[in-house]
Amino acid sequence: MPRMIPQCQWLRQLGSGHIYHWTPTLALREDMVALDIESAEARIKAIKTFLEEGGMDAQSRAEYSERLTKAHEVAKELTRMEVDMEAARARKEAASLPPSEKDQPDQQTTEEQAEERRQQILEKDPTAKRIAAMPHKKAVREFMMIEFGEEIDTEPKLDELKAMALDRYSKRLFEAEGL
């Protein structure tokens, strides 16, 4: 049975960061997470400000690059704020629990939860699946050249090359998501 995010006002798509109003159909999607009202309003305000300042309508490549960098920084900062807010809520909730429930060993730390979430995202990501299914070194080399513009040494074993490509891809993926 697919998971469904409980009804809330806003949802955020993991890969793109786009914000949507909650609907039952969107809530069933694996790449959607609930977004509290304060975070959604902060993200919407940042996007509106960015668009009012000209968005990506740049006169030169340097200006475009500068605006793109600024947009990524704002997105990362908002994601950090959301993570901090979630951690604060978890601490507040843990403080309100009776002592017998606080000391249960099955509760995960935020780092463990983040790592588990990263692993779940990678398991569902089509590019990560494609990397794992690459049949030979040449395919990994071509992928690295196309995706990252890097020429790699093909002397290591195929599994090592796949691990290197997956590591590089996951760093970029999670950096964009702020995880």
Image (cartoon, grey):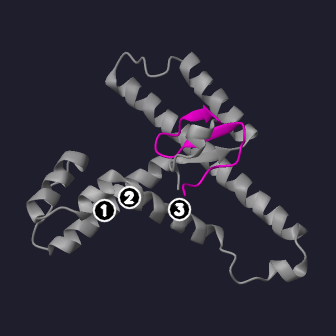
The kind of residue on which mark 3 rests is Arg
Residue under label 2: 170
**Within the image, what quadrant is residue 61 found in?**
top left
Q: Are marks 1 and 2 in contact (CB under 8 Å)?
A: yes
Q: CA distance from mark 2 to mark 3?
A: 12 Å
Between circles 2 and 3, the one closer to the viewer is: 3
Q: Quadrant of the N terminus?
A: bottom right
Residue under label 1: 166
In the rendering, at what x and y percent does residue 67 appear? 46, 28
Number of other residues with Cα within 10 Å of mark 3, as a class: few under 14, some 14 to 19, many 20 or more: few
The kind of residue on which mark 1 rests is Leu
In the rendering, at what x and y percent does residue 37 appear? 74, 38
Q: Sequence-wise, which precedes: disc 3 or disc 1?
A: 3
Mark 3 element type: helix
Q: Which residues are magenta?
A: 1-22
Q: Which mark is residue 30?
A: none
Image check: 127 left or right of 6?
A: left
> Residue at left 65%, top 46%?
34
Residue under label 3: 117
